[in-house]
Image: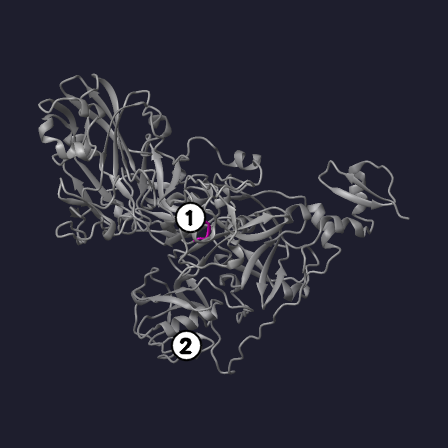
Amino acid sequence: MVNHKRYPCQCGLNIIMPGCSSHACCLVALLCLWVPCAAQYEAWGYPEAYGEAEEHHTAPELPPDTPKIQLRLAGEKRKHNEGRVEVFYGGEWGTVCDDDFTIHAAHVVCRELGYTEAVSWYPGSKYGKGEGRIWFDNVHCTGKEKTLAQCSSNGIGVSDCKHTEDVGVLCSDKRIPGFKFINTLTNNIESLNIHVEDVRIRAILASYRKRIPVTEGYVEVKDEGRWKQLCDVDWTPMNSHVICGMFGFPGERRYNARVYKMFARRRKHTYWDYSVNCTGTESHLSSCKLGRNEAEKINGSCAEGLPVVVSCVPGRSFAPTPMAGFRKAFRQEQPLVRLRGGAIVGEGRVEVLKNGEWGTICDDNWNLISATVVCRELGFGTAKEFLTGGRLGQGMGPVHMNEVECSGFEKSITECSFNKESLGCSHEEDAGVRCNVPAMGFQQRLRLSGGRNPFEGRVEVLAERNGSLVWGTVCGEGWGTMEAMVVCRQLGLGFASHAFQETWYWPGEVSADRVVMSGVRCSGTEMSLSHCLHHGEYLDCPRGGGRFAAGVSCSETAPDLVLNPQIVEQTTYLEDRPMVMLQCAYEEDCLARTASQVPANSYRRLLRFSSQIHNNGQSDFRPKASRESWVWHDCHRHYHSMEVFTHYDLLNLNGSKVAEGHKASFCLEDSECDEGIEKRYECANFGEQGITLGCWDTYRHDIDCQWVDITDVKPGDYIFQVVINPNYEVAESDYTNNVMKCRCRYDGHRIWMYSCHIGGSFSSETEDTFPGLLNNQVTHR
């Protein structure tokens, strides 16, 4: 019987040698390079179904007289699957005129490039003006053509257009199954972009196959319906840099090449015909150029090399264990960049810290290269898309950077050159990003069931019970907006619009009625519901699941309420008001508790101020309750659509509360709006309540309850704090800016309000001087 012994190796190998006695570990490793040893490969474990039969794609046959052209998407692209349509013909790149161009022609272009369809097309050189000839003009397609060259036109090169009329297309993210790249060029191949059906990092070693996310393995492309390896001849670190970025990793590292060499000699590989040539600044492989045709030189094999392997460094949020490599490459000091207002991890409005104050970046010259610098700095991969025009909500404070220009290799966006003058820039031009993030598999462990559309339904989670994975429900008791926000984020459905504690009207899967999760409490920032606090194995759900299971409805956009701190600072004053004039306020609990113990002819000292609440988000702010359930207050003769809309607190310098006030939503309406935006909400005649995007609701200092009763407060230095939507009744894109704080000095007769600012608008050092609620993070409730 053969004796198999395992020798753990200091060199990083774990080797099984049949019939071996004790040897020096590294010597054993060297011997295994030469001695056939089948058992060692079993220990490493190759992925299941490697080399499985896959669907073959038959390339469309074209009539012999069809002109041979190549297409690419070029210009100032927001993401990789869009751009100016460029045509290679007669040894020269040129463009297509927008005259008579239609969505049918766009479909032909996108399918020729391997995308399933076109989403839209754009005239007027949206992606910048091209150069060279305008090859096609007055293009007419039915949408069924196999190539743009089959569409009727004035004739190749016959055009009366200028490059201001260059057409562009936006293609679907989805690729054509079985797509095969066909190269019709014999020269100038280095000017072609890469178009394959799919790309992946395939874990080879057993230790990496068990990790989520996959950070190391073969780089494989799917071409003609088959997965193929890349030959590492001519492969460069810049190529690895782009591949890692594509899959959500900020950087790459070295790997144990000897292990892969030993493994490669035991397997037959199928190599892609071409090599890859990236500069390192590309955000996606499709933006890299083709290298030489490997098949022509070495007959489809990789005789001089091996399959390409990459090993990527995950960001802090995605590392399975604390990663020393990431800490060395990316400093963990006070962050200089952050994202705000995004629905999912890795997207948001870009904000930078300068002189202790957070501000935004103007979108002039904003592009994928600069956006990628931001994404890598934050521990994500390359930029999936850059955004302009305040698409992810408008920020507050200064605009710190304008006309940013990056090389693509900076460690921080603050190292890029920029114009310090931001004249003409407003928050309507705030720049944003959507970054590539690692595939963590969170979406597969959660689903919505029974809803009328994919954005709503009963929440069902995949949980382990008695050694097997089963679907079950979440207990609806205590379920709220924060928990719903995490569910919508985990499923990639945007923001929560509502959280439901009963879902009897959404019949889910009967087999999933059993409660498998209870006591869920989220801060709202988690990537997965399983990361929230919950009861674990010992459930507690008295009402059970079924009709009382938790549910959500999601929305791609959300409002974002922000209080104007300057208005508070400028309108603050004291008023001594007799109790006889405060009866309505007393009934609505707007006075201090001692007000119930004083005679009617006494006075209360009120700290009065105005508040101007802006909606800077992406959609209108609407009260949670429908108008049928609004509460009529006879004393003030108005409806309250939200019983608690704001909290007003006076804190001492230790953060302890010394006085408080609260404001029901007197009436949510549009007091004023930005130029070009019409008011939609008005309280008169029982009208609809809300705050339109781009508008603000002003609560004047002279209305009831717009105060804090400080009758019992002693003179001294204090902190005044306002919290909007304190109970998170309505979902917002950013809760961190719902807090406003001011320094406050009261001498017994007068009051001064100064240094008013929105929560999180200053550096952490500055915020530390304002104790109380941590306003740059949402804490567990």
Label 2 to label 1: alpha-carbon separation: 35 Å
* Magenta span dominant secondary structure: helix
- Residue 491 in magenta? yes
Mark 2 or mark 1: which comes first in sequence?
Answer: 2
Who is closer to the viewer here, 118 or 169?
118
Asked whether the residues under the numbered discs 2 and 1 touch, taking CB atoms below 8 Å apart as contact, a structural biologist would say no
Who is closer to the viewer here, 553 or 285?
553
Estimate how packed mark 1 is, as few (under 14), some (14 to 19) or many (20 or more) residues with alpha carbons within 10 Å.
Answer: many
Who's the residue at 53% across and 34% down the image? 327
Name the element at disc 1. Answer: loop
Q: Which residues are magenta?
A: 484-492
- Considering only vertical position in the picture, is 292 above or below 33? below
The amino acid type found where label 2 is placed reads Gly
**Res 287 seen here:** yes
Residue 439's disc is none
Who is closer to the viewer here, 227 or 773?
773
Q: Is residue 267 left or right of residue 464?
A: right
Report the residue marked by disc 1. Answer: 344
The amino acid type found where label 1 is placed reads Ile
Q: Position of residue 508 (x, y in %)?
A: 47, 58
Report the residue marked by disc 2. Answer: 143
Q: Position of residue 466 (x, y in %)?
A: 63, 48
Who is closer to the viewer here, 73 or 539?
539
Estimate how packed mark 2 is, as few (under 14), some (14 to 19) or many (20 or more) residues with alpha carbons within 10 Å.
Answer: some
Name the element at disc 2. Answer: loop
Q: Quadrant of residue 763?
A: top left
Q: Is residue 248 left or right of residue 3?
A: left
